[in-house]
Image (cartoon, rainbow, N blue to C red):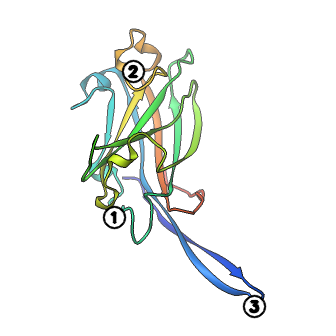
Amino acid sequence: MKTLLLISCIVAAASGVISAPTTALAEQFVLFDVTFTYTKEDADNSKPSKSHYYVKGDKLNPNRPKDWTTPIDYRNGTVHIRLEVLEKPPGGAPTTWTLCYIPNKGQKNGYGCTGTGIYREKGVYERDVPMTSFWENDSIIWSEGIKQTDLVIKDDSGGGGHAHKRTDHEKFFPTKVRLTMVQVSAGAKYEAIEVSK
């Protein structure tokens, strides 16, 4: 497994005339960093759901917190999503990956998802998403932690646009991507980190 980094940075602030420093701890950690090739055959045969790539076991950071609410609040922070599209069929078909958090314990729908945004070509795409803004984020009991992340390749038609269903699937497969998700604590800003290849 690629090296997963758990890093922290100290942010100092001063208030008043007497420069009395106060210290706040801001933290971030890599939830996962995976590079994989994904084919139409992979999409057709992934179980239990098609067009899914499952990030679990040793692909997920074993040092991720068991509780995402305390002592460090990741639940109300942000996730930095970095997608590096290494290979993609020509034609510029709009493509996206839905990124679903699968909790140890859920409620209502039982899981929640964010995404990479739409892309058409090879390249690097990055975005920061508030953890309280994505689909069904409140269906996860964050104090119980996350057991896996499901990555779902889709077109730009919405929730049910799984790429394996397309009649022109050759515009989506095969593809090779590197996907990294970095969790950033509440009130903190993502700090770029070096993750080994």
Secondary-structure class at tag 3: loop
Q: Mark 3 belongs to which amino acid? A: Ile
Which residue does the image show at 34% across and 15% down from the upper left?
A: 165
Residue 115 in the image: state x and y as whole percent: 47, 37
Which residue does the image show at 52% across and 39% down from the upper left?
A: 83
Residue that badge 1 annotates: 67
Q: Mark 2 belongs to which amino acid? A: Ala
Dividing the picture into quadrants, the one containing residue 124 is top right
| Above-or-below relation of 185 to 102 | below
Instruction: Check the image and name the residue furthest to the top.
Output: 167
Point out which mark residue 76 bears. Answer: none
Q: Mark 2, mark 3: which one is toward the viewer?
A: 3
* Residue 66 vs residue 33, the one in the foreground: 66
Residue 169 in the image: state x and y as whole percent: 40, 14
Secondary-structure class at tag 2: helix
Q: Is residue 105 left or right of residue 161?
A: left
| Above-or-below relation of 71 to 179 | below
Sequence-wise, which precedes: disc 2 or disc 3?
Answer: 3
Q: CA distance from mark 1 to mark 3?
A: 37 Å
Dot 1, how many residues are within 10 Å of its Cα: few (below 14), some (14-19), or many (20+)? Answer: some
Q: Mark 2, mark 1: which one is toward the viewer?
A: 1
Dot 2, how many residues are within 10 Å of its Cα: few (below 14), some (14-19), or many (20+)? Answer: many
Dividing the picture into quadrants, the one containing residue 53 is top left
Residue 71 in the image: state x and y as whole percent: 40, 72
Dividing the picture into quadrants, the one containing residue 46 is top left
In contact (CB < 8 Å): disc 2 and disc 1: no
Residue that badge 3 annotates: 18
* Residue 197 vs residue 133, the one in the foreground: 133
Instruction: Check the image and name the residue furthest to the right.
Output: 17
| Above-or-below relation of 74 to 131 | below
Point out which mark residue 163 bears. Answer: 2
